[in-house]
Image (cartoon, rainbow, N blue to C red):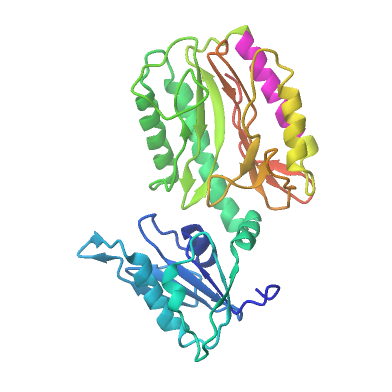
Amino acid sequence: MRRHNLDLVIVARTEHVQWLTGPRFGWVYEPLAALWKDGTCTLVAPNEAPKVHAADNVVTYEAQWLCTLRNDQRRAAVDELKKVLATQGHARRIGVEYSCFPKHFGDLSLDDLDDPLDCFDIEPSLFKLRRRKDADELARIKHAIGATGAMYTKAREIVRPGLNELEMFNTLQSTAVEYLGEMLTGTGNDYASGVPGGPPRNRRIEAGELYVLDLGPAFRGYFADNCRAIAVDGKPTPLQLSAQKHIAEVFPMVMETVKPGASCRGFFLQVKQHLDKFAGARFDHHLGHGIGLFPHEAPHLNSHWDDVFEVGDVFTCEPGLYSDELRGGIRLENDYVVTETGVELLSDFPLDL
């Protein structure tokens, strides 16, 4: 805020409200948060003040009338925030998220001047700041990752020809809920067998298929993202085993190559060159991405971005190979955190088929 000469920052994205103030609000609500240059923070919360928060003061708006959700919550939240801002002094230059800055602030008047508000897009800065995970954020991510470990253990116990994909999905969701001890705040991603990915279908899985399970449970807003491939009948073919071995060779490359300042695009191209050596199969997606309060964050292990790894990044690495002969394909995905000297593996689960 000092660098950009901002008097005030107002955020409306649920993830940014949580990042600044602590509480996680459901997607049906539209909270706001305001941060003054002296560090004073106001949270505008739906219905009632949360029991735990990091704001200096909390005001509320009525998000529901007789339990019915209002569809004009943003207007109501802005009205309450205006009352607070009117008592806080002058603010002429304000940081906002251009992607979702409420038009309701168009008539905002914080002093007796006639000058229009000078708005600055703070969103790129917020996304950059969110890359470096604090200890409490990393703890939540690790807990979510632990849930994926429990899910893979359960999947290996129950997988068999004839199992319905919906049964696998339901069982794994239940496993994650039991592990976390509460409802998930997100889930994902792929639960279809015999194909590279997709949602679960009302379909029975078949012998010879590989079951790609790309799992992304979220704990109190923070996402995990891991993938394993499992042979439905427990009898992977020589081709499938060879592909699995080739893919798994990427993970030592992560430990050897990734460190602060290393190029994400360069690492993507290095891994793609390795995977492309496996004849008859394709690798046609990103190599990975950051995770946190959103399933896909920076850094981007992708040729369309030119990021570099930074200390505190939590990211995925998900090499894969796909072909009809592989009966769908194989994707293996691990989570890592970037340290001062390299990376730490966060998902030490078996990689075998």
Residue 342 visible in the shown view: yes
Estimate the x, y position of residue 307 in percent, counting from the top left.
72, 47
Q: Main secondary structure of the magenta part?
A: helix
- Using residue 275 as the reference point, say whether residue 21 is left or right of it: left
Name the quarter where the N terminus is drawn.
bottom right
Estimate the x, y position of residue 114 in percent, counting from the top left.
51, 88
User: Is-magenta flag for residue 305?
Assistant: no
- Using residue 134 as the reference point, say whether residue 218 is left or right of it: left
Furthest residue to the top?
238
Estimate the x, y position of residue 176 in percent, counting from the top left.
43, 39
What residue is rendered at 51% in x and 13% in y?
234
User: Is-magenta flag for residue 240?
Assistant: yes
Tell me which segment is drawn in magenta.
239-254
From what the image shows, is residue 293 above or below residue 327?
below
What residue is rendered at 46% in x and 20% in y?
193
From what the image shows, is residue 129 above or below residue 103?
above
Residue 49 visible in the shown view: no
